[in-house]
Amino acid sequence: MTTPDARRAAALHLHDALVKTRGEEWLRFQGSSMAPTLCEGDLLSVRHVAAGELAFGDIVVFEGAEASVVHRLLCAPRLRAPLLTKGDNAWRLDQPFAPDRLVGKVCTVRIDLEHGWWRWVSRAIALVSLLEAGALWFAVDVRRRWYPEGVLRLGVERRLVRMLSRGRRLVIDALLRTVPHVEAR
């Protein structure tokens, strides 16, 4: 297992290599935050791009606290505004980050993500993730405002999170099945 310092150094090395060459760099995906779109061990081609070149639904790589993070962009970037991302398999939004922490954009995962159906599937998955995060925030906010004394138990929130996660996974699986050359995992 690598240490946080080693992962941070590797992330900085990747960022420096991309900035110097302005080209593409290959890396191996680790984790489950982007399942079922990305699986452990998938090879990703990351191209350095400016924040202004990104679009809603793109999969981006940015420098996290301990390592590089691969998540989906949930908002179109504006001038000097923080970028908002979320993993497809996560139920919370990531902390917004400054565009200078952007490493690049994932453009290839065994197939081309920039053309054809993938562009629309990526946007649909981002929309589903954004709706899920909004619904969860709304439910928690309603519970805290209207039932501050704990009339509703936390079990209600847990059931809501499970229900939203199940719905998100069903929608994402259905969207991924619409792309003919993606095998089921």
Image (cartoon, rainbow, N blue to C red):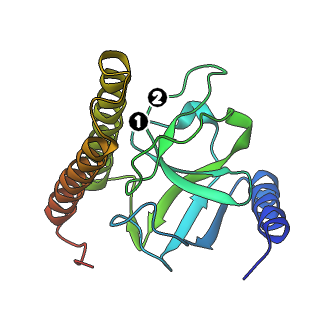
Task: State the residue at coordinates (62%, 71%).
Answer: 26
Q: Residues within 10 Å of mark 1 (few under 14, many from 20)?
A: some
Q: Position of residue 112 (x, y in %)?
A: 39, 63
Q: Position of residue 28 (x, y in %)?
A: 58, 75
Q: Earlier in the sequence, mark 2 or mark 1?
A: 1
Q: Amino acid at mark 2?
A: Ala
Among the 4 quarters of the image, the one containing residue 51: top right
- Name the quarter where the N terminus is drawn: bottom right
How far apart are labels 2 and 1 at the CA level?
5 Å
Q: Amino acid at mark 1?
A: Phe
**Residue 105 versus residue 29: which sits nearer the camera?**
29
Please report contact status of discs 2 and 1: CB closer than 8 Å, yes or no. yes
Q: Left or right: 150 with respect to 105?
A: left
Secondary structure of the residue carrying numbered label 1: loop
Secondary structure of the residue carrying numbered label 2: loop
Q: Position of residue 163 (x, y in %)?
A: 20, 50
Residue beneath disc 2:
76
Q: Left or right: 14 with respect to 41?
A: right
Q: Left or right: 17 with respect to 91?
A: right
**Residue 112 versus residue 127: which sits nearer the camera?**
127
Task: State the residue at coordinates (26%, 53%).
Answer: 162
Relative to 165, say whether 123 is above or below. Answer: above
Residue beneath disc 1:
56
